[in-house]
Image: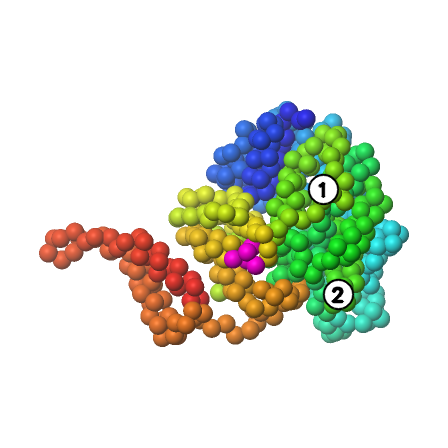
Amino acid sequence: MFRKILIANRGEIAVRILRACRELGIRTAVVFSEADRKSLHVRLADEAYLIGPAASRESYLRIDKIMDVVRRAGCDAIHPGYGFLAENAALPRACVEAGITFIGPSAEAMEALGAKTSGRQLARRADVPTVPGTNDPLEDPQHAQDLARGMGYPVLLKAVAGGGGKGMRLVTSDSEFAAAFREASSEALNAFGDASVYLEKYLDKPRHIEIQILADAHGRVVSLGERECSVQRRHQKVIEEAPSPIMTPELRKRMGDAAVRLARAGGYTNAGTVEFLVDTHYNFYFLEVNTRLQVEHPVTEQVTGLDLVKLQIAIAAGHRLPFAWETITPRGHAMEVRLYAEDPENNFFPSPGKILSQHTPSGPGIRVDEGVYEGWTVPIDYDPLLSKLIAWGNSREETIARLRRGLEEYSITGIKTNSGLFRRILADPDFVRAEIHTKWLDELLRRPHPLAQDGTSGEEAAAVAAAVWQATHNGANLAAPTPGGNTGVSESEWKREGRRQQRERLL
């Protein structure tokens, strides 16, 4: 096993990896930018190294700085987490040159499967169904538009090197194409350093279902089952669950077999995710491979009882997987929500700032993976993910109930979060019935949403909001000396918090 691992990431995923290393008795080193000097992963690591200013291109995306820290810290392995350099083949190549173990796939497998166009080519050779589209990157906008016209609108422009909805544009007509191509290419370049895009036929209301795979260096490739990721906002996953509500044993086996077949064809090792779109007739189509650990990996851990980060480390150290995938069956149901520092009432605008107070939910079936703490200032420079709230139950119904309870207990002040959005989603009858698809949330957000959802009238809601506003803005005067020399008494913080939560429920 490794002696010391460098975690080349930040936030909750860095903390998640730190905890796995600590349980394995492995020392950790982390890197941080100027903006992250007081971050939780810096506080928890055995060693921490400054690598540059806040801008990712000057810090977390600098392979030369990462490798310099590896040498200075005496690490024998690197875990990239997700995002940043996790799917950049240059990092595992640099590790090979330096004699350092990269906890992930080889550069060759990453390029064969991680790049969207080469992944599609390999899928077709491995007899894995693919969504109709182009197999090569598109450089000429006019040629791309001709292909789109021949394919038939609507189509998707997608970043070759991307994920998370970045560098993706839906195009419904010729008149939109030129601008969409420019925007997708520009966003792809800014996000991934690669402006290449490709075309894919747009499927109407599909479900997004992904298969978690593990592969060791001894030829064993296993599927750990599926995750349903259909609740998305602008192609970005919002809620994930396992197992999928539509899954049957036969469909799970066919999708698992396809994922394993593709991983073998690409010479893949370590953890990865093969993503599919499933249409209304339960036909599935290969979408892409994420050659890294996923944000939503905890839901798979909850239903399998496995620790994916520890397994990643063990595979990288040369150990064999101790089980066959036929032995893995989901136990119960798990669901995850991504809590962001953003304001859903203001077009999901980022909400950086200092966390004044925080209460983390707990109790049966509740898990929280987070990288924040009370008193920390959320920077504007990075993805605004604060925490992941995960619930597990014996059934989907129990899991939803526990997740609702967890969201009611969750409290953070000083910044805005999207927790109210999840309460709305979990209360929606379509979601409860699992009648969802990749455009479902966008459609939900376009529907009229009454201010009061608990029977409170608009007039009463306005009165509560006005009272909370006054208490918030005049709070500094509540403890000030009152006329006549008497000292005023601060309003109960419990009352303030109660009013704040009531207002959140109303909005």
Looking at the picture, tell me which residue is in the foreground, 406 or 327. Answer: 327
**Range covered by the magenta-colored residues:** 397-401
Q: Sequence-wise, which precedes: disc 1 or disc 2?
A: 1
- For disc 1, the neighbor class at 10 Å (few under 14, some 14 to 19, many from 20) is many
Badge number at residue 279:
2
User: As displayed, is residue 292 above or below residue 173?
Assistant: above
Q: Is residue 193 left or right of residue 507?
A: right
- Amino acid type at mark 1: Ala
Q: Is residue 370 left or right of residue 94?
A: left
At x 48% / y 53%, what residue is drawn? 406
Q: CA distance from mark 1 to mark 2?
A: 26 Å
Majority secondary structure in the magenta region: helix
Specify how the rendered protein is coloured: rainbow
Q: Is residue 297 magenta?
A: no
User: As displayed, is residue 323 above or below residue 331?
Assistant: above
At x 81% / y 50%, what residue is drawn? 257
At x 35% / y 72%, what residue is drawn? 460
User: As displayed, is residue 320 above or below residue 400?
Assistant: above
Q: Residue furthest front?
A: 394
- For disc 2, the neighbor class at 10 Å (few under 14, some 14 to 19, many from 20) is some
Mark 1 — residue? Answer: 271
Q: Residue furthest right?
A: 125
